[in-house]
Image (cartoon, grey):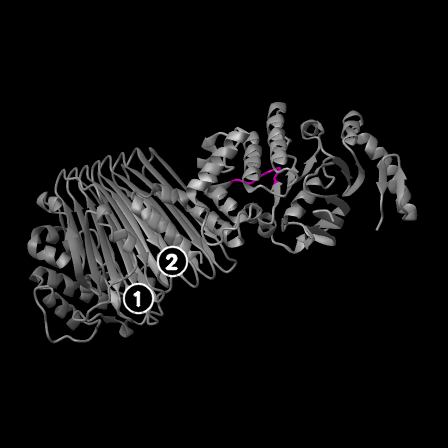
Amino acid sequence: MADLAIRDLHVQVEEKVILKGINLELSRGEIHAVMGPNGSGKSTLANVLMGNPFYQITRGDVLYKGEDLLAMSPDERARKGLFIAFQYPVSIPGVTMASFLRTAVSARRGYEQELMPVAEFQKLLREKMEALRVDPAIVGRYVNEGFSGGEKKRAEILQMALLEPEIAIMDETDSGLDIDSVKIVADGIMQMHRNASGGMGVLVITHYSRILQFLRPHHVHIIYDGRIVVSGGPELAQELEERGYEGIRQQFEVIAAEVQESGAIRRAGKVFWVTH
Amino acid sequence: MSTEGTTQVAAAALSRATVEQQSARLGEPAWARERRLAAWEAFERLPAPAVARPEEWRRTDVGALDLGALAVPDPQGSPARQGRHGPLVRDEATRAGWLAHADGRTVGRALRAELARAGVVFTDLACAMREHEALVREHLFALASPEEHRFRALHGALWSAGTFLYVPPGVEVALPLVAQTWLGTPGGVVFPHTLVVADQGSRVALIETFASAPAERRALASGVVELIARPGAQVRYAAVQEWGPSTWEVGSVVRARVERDALVHTTMVALGGDLVKVDVEAHLGGPGASAEMLGLYFGTGGQHVDVHTLQEHAAPHTTSDLLYKGAVRDAARAVFAGLIRVHPGAQKTNAFQANRNLVLSAGARTDSIPKLEIMANDLRCTHGSATSRLNEEHIFYLMSRGLTRRQATFMIVEGFFADVFDRLPFETLRGYLQARVAEKMI
């Protein structure tokens, strides 16, 4: 079984249904990209996987290494190796990055009562900061407070490097970054992926294909209106780059109408729709 | 103690006779005894504070307090030494002197010899009255009158084991002095009085701690702190209050008189007690005077904390900067009422006031009442208050990194208090309070 298996996931916020039956499987070692236009449910998927209490799951399940992920609290998920790099990480006044990171790393590494020894943590932190070319001054600042867009994204990647996840979800980590920064961030992810030698799976959620030039996903999924409507290899991202979401939309709308009528499983071109 | 009476073996009721006995036991001069008796007379005459000053006492009801059930601790008893506050006092390297009061008696004292030689006086008030009578007579109750309200009158009649600190002109005391007040008698009362006189151009810091036994019976404390900063003097004062869970602290005041070019920095920490009502005030009386006022309170369980602050600008070119932060959890309630008063003619005043509250449970509440009375027209004055609840997005973010909900909440609370910690004038206090706030989170 895949390390992360999402089956028929339905999610809503208050009365609004956002995810309408997501199916996806991802294992360590793999890199998947989920691409979709604004409002398609990409960020919802990422947040639900991490356990954001803002969303209600109405149907479906998610197995993580064979266990019921949805029954776990966010911290339990994190300690078991799930990670999300947030699109909009919140800033927390008064809490220094140093103290936050040390507590987080200690939690991930199974320290129960005490924290990881300072010296050991500092050595680890220095290593990771050098590898990712993160300004060491960041650790004395409050969590994300006053960070530029790029600094926030890099801080997320730094956390990922420190926590050494088994499955990492990158929620629009490329958005708001210039191309040089996208490359630095993507290089960092690839480096971690290599270093993990098959121990880390990555789910990249993105609107644009440019980060995928650096990340080279094995699988690409297109999410549209709360469903994954197309899955394929890396060539799918290329195709999307050329034709845009408009091409997908047209195919999608044709099938949507047919499915509405007959309730069957349909496939037209690269778009398919499974009703449940 | 010079006079060891033999008549008194048990705790004594709050009465005129007890006032007289106390004055006699301490071997006080006539003027001091007369002041105590005048205060007792005021206590008997004054109405309840809720009647006399309804606005100030509107949010804190002390009507349930039964003064008849309280007693002055037996001065012959051997009070248990308190275990708390150790980190603040134990390390001699971090303090210039130490004074310990327990159940109304002074049980320990120390002052570095070079400071004593320089003329610094750091001792209990009764002793100071004998050895430095003129100084004490001039300043004791110069800033706080027993006529102000009933609890202050009671304090004026029955204060004991006070702390006296005098710093001669130009003398600088680098390390803080520490004074501890402990109440170990269940159902006991304690009226701690602190008088600090920092003479011209001197510098000094005093940390005071207050704690009581975790007894079931209601105990009462009502204190007065008088801080006098003569021209050019700098006084840093911190009160760390960790009364036991049944103690009421009612009608206490920390009041500073800041003269020309002097500076007073006060820190008020309220962590303990069942009901606490204190005032913290700075009166800026001379040009160039400035006051910094820090406050930290954390109410849990059914605690009630009510703090009134006053920044009084009575002279031109004066500055005050106040930051009070509080957290409440469970069914606790906190009240902050802060007044900035600028007198006519106090031009070029700079006055800042900020109060921030963090509400951690649905059943907890805070009130924040900023007030301004401005009677000058050339000044800069800002005030702001805000109350926020625990932000679930912040919690989720921290939990998504593996922190438990408790760890995440703790980190946010610690972060909330960070700017108060950062502005604390004493390194020892910072570490101590961080640990105490952590304890309150459990």
Which numbered circle lies on residue B440?
none
Which secondary structure dominates the residues rendered in magenta? loop
| Residue extending furthest toward the top | A180
Would you place residue B66 above or below residue A143 in this image?
A: below
The part of the chain drawn in magenta is A85-91
Is residue B386 left or right of B8 when viewed as pictured? right
* Residue A63 percent location from the top left of the image: 70, 51
| Residue extending furthest toward the front | A197
Does the magenta-highlighted stretch encompass residue A241? no
Label 2: how many Cα within 10 Å (few below 14, some 14–19, many 20+): many
Identify which residue is drawn at 51% across, 50% down. B408
- Pinpoint the chain carrying mark 2: B
Q: Which residue is mark 2?
A: B305
Amino acid marked by disc 1: Ala
Which element carries disc 2, helix, strand or loop? strand
Label 1: how many Cα within 10 Å (few below 14, some 14–19, many 20+): many
Please name whichever residue, B158 or B399, is drawn nearer the observer in this view of the structure: B399
Which numbered circle lies on residue B213?
1
Which element carries disc 1, helix, strand or loop? loop
Please name whichever residue, B265 or B397, is drawn nearer the observer in this view of the structure: B397
* Residue B132 percent location from the top left of the image: 8, 52
